[in-house]
Amino acid sequence: MIEKKDNSVFEQSIPQKIENQINAHNSLSADELKILPDSLEKSDIEAKIHEANRFLPKSHPAHVLEAKIPDKIVNRTRVDAALIANAKSFVAQGKYVPEFFFAGAGTRMGAGAFYFIDPAGIAKDILDKKGASYKKYQLLNAQERSLIEMSIREFYDSEKDNLSLALGPRELLQFAASVMTYGRESGIDEPEALRSQKMIIHINDQVNPETSKPYCDEIITDFIKRRFFGFDPKKVVFLIQPAFRAYRIRKQSTTNIIIEEVPNSEELVYGHGYATCQMARVEDAFVVLGDDPHTRSAVTNDQGGAVNALSYIQLLGGEILGTHRINDLTKLDSDQAFDPVRIATQLEFIRDGHNVVVELVDNPTGQKGGNWMGFQKSVYKEFEKDYSESFLLEGVNTKTNAYQELFDRQINSGYPESFINRFMSFMDQTNQVSLKAHDIKGLPYNAFRLAYSIEGVKNILKTYELPYNLRYKFGCLYLESVTGDISQFRESRSASFVLADEDWRMELIHDFKEMKNLSEALLAIKKQNHDADFRKVTVASLKTK
């Protein structure tokens, strides 16, 4: 049994991390960030924060970077059937390990932890004109409200036998259903396929205001009630991400400042990058083997010594780790949740020596950040000892004017000729004209469907800590770390790919982040409700303890 996690070591490091970020580019001063009524306007402080978070110091201008072309463009209809069969068998044998990010909150929809959000329940509250979700719905414009109301009525008119399930259970049950299907197709007994699976679950210790209980305890209790969704509890590794208070800067003298915790301030988690780093910390990983959510056992090796989450799942036979976000609606789709084309592509890259593989998606709105970038060839020698040749550059590091201009010039001016030529090398001549006419405003960006070599990422996280950025909220300072930054390390040998349909149209992202995404969420659960394998595992899971 392990005791409640002591986060004091990290807490003690927060002031120094904030000071390091402040000093990184000499962009901030104590006077400018004092949390006092006569401090700068919020917009001016945020501009200073953006300067502190810039990717490179001013000595390296933004134009040393350039947009990079994805390493591979995969047409779904042209992938060899043997590769797809191999990917399904790989999943059924438990060699592909999902990393579920269940720590998010649906505040934009007036709801708590995403794990417990049921899109159908939100729809019902809107129809009944009650609750916090209805208030969020009312903030939408008239056209958005009309479209959502129409989709709600269509959903309830057609779904007389709706499965009342929240997003977390839906995603886990879809995992079980996919494993069963792939097991049958690979000649592996269904129970054996389920027993072979292992997973990492990220949850947080923020408190549910309705129950006054930590969400992590409530989620673990749900696993116990549902018999771990048919999976082996010994192979379900939990990591609890703590929330931390805010900090402020106080001027002590003309030259000295003090960075101090703000008493009773709002506690926030410090980004999914923190959760990613937890996989390499021995003291953070545990399993729950009984009926008490508080009886937690450290994960161990064959000799009984405590190990970290990555080492543990590797000992159990895991080879590749894949990220799965709670609000990614493709994870509710039997065709895409554990997409064999995607996994076959990831497997190919990892077996070729790449430790981090990034899936990119179409960018019709010209989003800035999360794009596939790298250094220009003429300057890469200066950076190659630290950086991968290509990597993700996240939005939090690109909000200064210089980087925004870079994005406008290189990314949002339509596809560059090199990108079009890359596509053409994969395409039939008949499709070339349609690509040139395709109305695109930006280069592909991160879908947050990363895949890692477990051995490779274990060594990276043993050597490095992901960087922390400053976050200004509630008039105070917090830290925030981004998972995508793991692609930047030289040892990551990062690679990227784009999935495309038969006509070479790149796939789009399908997220449930805010109220205006509710219509798409209802379509996703409607399709999932009618999947035979999904209904089979759902009926079994409803026989709770």
Image (tube, grey):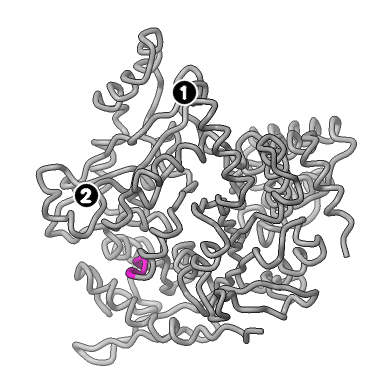
**Compared with residue 189, is residue 438 higher up or lower down, i.e. above or below?**
above
Q: Main secondary structure of the magenta part?
A: loop
Q: Position of residue 89 (x, y in %)?
A: 60, 41
Q: Position of residue 348 (x, y in %)?
A: 42, 39
Q: Position of residue 183 (x, y in %)?
A: 69, 41
* Residue linked to disc 2: 402
- Name the disc covering residue 12, or none: none
Reply yes or no: does residue 194 show up in magenta.
no
Between discs 2 and 1, the one toward the N terminus: 2
What secondary structure is found at the residue carrying circle 2? helix
Residue at 18% over, 59% down: 385
The residue stretch that appears in magenta: 463-467
**Compared with residue 349, is residue 286 higher up or lower down, i.e. above or below?**
below
Tag 2: residue type? Ala
Work out whether residue 2 or residue 163 is closer to the camera in this orientation and state it: 2
Tag 1: residue type? Arg
Residue at 68% over, 67% down: 234
Quarter of image, res 484: bottom left
Work out whether residue 305 or residue 258 is closer to the camera in this orientation and state it: 305
What secondary structure is found at the residue carrying circle 1? loop
**Compared with residue 214, is residue 272 higher up or lower down, i.e. above or below?**
above
* Residue linked to disc 1: 505
Q: Position of residue 268 (x, y in %)?
A: 53, 71
Classify 10 Å Cα crowding around label 2: few (below 14), some (14-19), many (20 and above). Answer: some
Work out whether residue 389 or residue 68 is closer to the camera in this orientation and state it: 389
Residue at 38% over, 67% down: 461
Q: Tell me, yes or no, if residue 339 can be seen here.
A: yes
